[in-house]
Image (tube, rainbow, N blue to C red):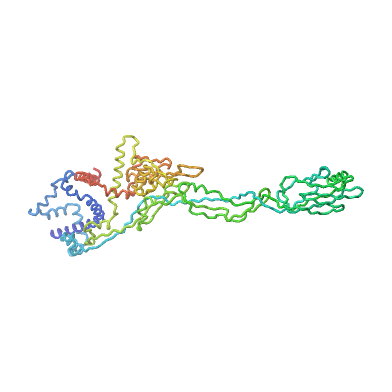
Amino acid sequence: MNKWITALSWAVLLIALASIFWVLSANANDQYNAGSGYASSIKDSSGKTIIAFDPSAALPDYTASPAESGYYGGVTAGSTNLDTQGNQALATSEAGKAITDSILNNPKDPISMDAPFISAGTDAQANAESVTNGSFDGCEAQQVSKTEFTTHICERDINVTRTCTRDAYISGNYVPVRVQKNISVANAGFTFVRDGSRVRGDFVSPVSGTVLAANFDYVLKSGMNGYTQSSTIVALGSTVVVKAYGNGNYGLNVSQFPLTAGQTYSVYLDINQKQHHDTFVNALLNNLQGKNGTWTTFSLNMVVLADEQTWQGTASWPGACALAQEAGAQLVSSTCSVGGGERQIVVDGVSHSVYSDCWQYTDTYRTQEADEGTCATYAANSACTLATQQCAYSLDGICLHQNVTYSCERKITGTGMVCGGEFFCTDGSCAQAVNGQSDSFQKAVSQLAAVAAAGKDVATMNDVNVSAFTGRGQSCRKAAVGFNNCCKASGWGSDVGLANCSSDEKALGKAKERLLTVDVGEYCSKKVLGGCLEKKRSYCVFDSKLAQIVQQQGRQWQLGIGFGSAESPNCSGINVAQLQALNFAIMDFKNFYADLENGSAIPDGDALAERIKEQVAAQMQQAGGGK
């Protein structure tokens, strides 16, 4: 009976240990992953650390002679009669009573040591060395792989195009033209006067030009007792004799006689009668003036090639719109936005039609070139996909700068051994392919480094209003006239076109390449006649990548505290209350990983032992309920 109970006790113990083993195995790989990574990083000093380790100094309540040591006296010692101790525990302990009650009240389950779950464990225990070297029959080699997705945060300028319109307007001027006109000057158009022995009729030319041909109409109504006399007519340099009773139309021998508008010209009329000459001349004058109630008709008719001014209209265009004055603006396209045709305009009371092929053009200018910024590596990687993009800041409603998130895929492979359904890495290289995130250790260290850096900043200040990660504001000229873009994100080591940039601008460019800046914004620093001749872009520059990450992802993105305006950047530090409100676990520290891997320092043995002591003490206190 005692032997049966003893066998049953060992079976129950094996089952309990197996259960514990399977429960703990769920976390084994995670712990192995972190442990293997850490062990690899300190492998040069691990031996010294173990040798110098003092368990009594590191482990609370440690004793070299626990009560349980009485059960084992060494390989040469006699039996300690564990059976008697086991039976006593079975009869008196709570666990023993539970086991006894289970035996008496539950049906007996047959247990076979050949059962697979028992034999596999015993075989593995018996052949532990062959499991690790891969020669154990119960293990087989297997290659594993895992696809890992990581997110990366970067920022970049975006391509900015803006449009403006140009409207045509009608303009015009007067131009000389020669027009053939028929001009007639009748009695009322003359001023008739007595000029010596004849009558002179003066008229003012209404036009300037050349008389091509001329004639006059003449009906003489001047007589005495019905007697009508002949007359001599001199006009436009031509002389015509009109015989008595010769009333009618008479041609003048005129060719290319010049006229000037506003100038007075004269026509002469004489009566060919010696007797009573004055009486006839006076009667002619009165009749030409209509004073006797009768009229002598005289009308001068001319065909004139007149010199005139006519208004001619045309469609005119203003100069380039204000966007063309923007620093660095480039014309991309110009399209007609209002179609052509005839339009009317009234000048001096006269309506004129003016034609244009187009009455409005819309011009498109590129005011900012796209810049990959800190996203170049991810944009060039075919395994990376743009996940999100958010405008960082705008100018006049136009987004200039974006915060971008890329999602990148990476496949991790490794070889290990599968033993009893559990996978084991034979050399640790495949741990990342099986468990956890590959950057879990780096992320944890980065968080600790950020907190430590903040504490260092705060510790060096004595003021009440202490702050950490303080930066400084700097600016650069962007695409200004006379030199290239001094705000470029890269190329500062080789681009000779940046020779005109100041030393501060070159230093800022290097800081941007090292990922130490936060882009604050852009503004026009020089304006002339409504056009922007020079722009400036402002940045907050920090001393470390950790400071940049905490300031941008913590202060700005988590707490919503901005960096001021482009004209006046606010690069102040983060105070203690703000630091306490930050969630370092959700920050992306990948930009810091390279610095961590290249410049990390492994703690020495004493420091490592002290750290272990502190961690174990904290775990013991937590397990003991804080006592």
> 150 or 543: nearer the eye?
543
> 402 or 530: nearer the eye?
530
> 189 or 458: nearer the eye?
189
Q: Quadrant of the C terminus?
A: top left
Rendering coords of residue 507 (x, y %): 35, 43
Rendering coords of residue 77 (x, y %): 7, 53
| The quarter of the displayed image where residue 286 is located | top right
Number of disc labels: 0
Image position of 533 (left or right of 250):
left
> 609 or 20: nearer the eye?
609
Question: Which residue is depicted at the point 19% across and 49% down?
Answer: 46
Q: Is residue 189 above or below residue 111?
A: above
Question: Which residue is depicted at the point 30% across and 43% down?
Answer: 451
| The quarter of the displayed image where residue 279 is located | top right
Q: Pick out the residue farthest to the front.
A: 274
Q: Quadrant of the N terminus?
A: bottom left
Question: Which residue is depicted at the point 50% across and 51% down?
Answer: 163
Rendering coords of residue 540 (x, y %): 38, 43
Q: Pick out the residue farthest to the top.
A: 463
Rendering coords of residue 554 (x, y %): 36, 45
